[in-house]
Amino acid sequence: MKPDPTARPQSPRRRPHRPADLAAFLEALALTGNFALAARAIGRTKGGLYKRRARDPAFAAACAAALAKFHSSPHRGRGVRSLQTG
């Protein structure tokens, strides 16, 4: 039997978030306060991390803590330039 040429190809299996990637993301989020920049810092899209936050209460709490750390820092925004250029 020949494959159907009109069938959509199966999407590739998604790469799971490794603990080291999540730790690096949370560190970048605490430095920048920006989900998109922090996601880019680990080579991921913000959409995938937003989905993880929505389904994983522990990760959601860690994101909230990272953002709180950013907002309480007197040096807010200083990490943004280093993430954008590096």
Image (cartoon, grey):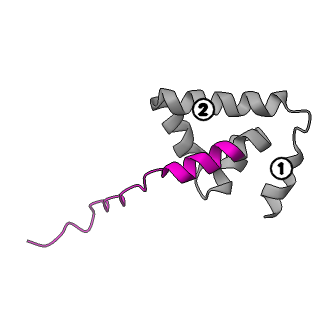
Quick check: 22 left or right of 5?
A: right
Quick check: 37 left or right of 59?
A: right
Where is residue 24 drawn, in percent x and y?
63, 50
The residue lying at 48 percent from left, 50 percent from top is: 17
For disc 1, the marked residue is: 80
Q: Nearer the viewer, residue 31 or 50?
A: 31
31 relative to 21, above or below: above
Residue type at mark 1: give it. Answer: Val
The residue lying at 20 percent from left, 66 percent from top is: 4
Residue type at mark 2: give it. Answer: Ala
Residue 21 magenta-drawn?
Answer: yes
- The quadrant the C terminus occupies is bottom right
The residue lying at 40 percent from left, 55 percent from top is: 14
Asked if the residue at tag 2 contacts the one at tag 1, i.e. Cβ–Cβ closer than 8 Å, the answer is no
Q: Magenta region's main secondary structure? A: loop
Where is residue 83 drawn, in percent x and y?
78, 56
2 relative to 7, above or below: below
Label 1 vs 2, first from the N-terminus: 2
Stretch in magenta:
1-27
The residue lying furthest to the bottom in this view is 2
Q: Residues within 10 Å of mark 2 (few under 14, many from 20)?
A: some
For disc 2, the marked residue is: 62
Q: Tell me the element at label 1.
A: helix
Give the mark toward the camera: 1 or 2: 2
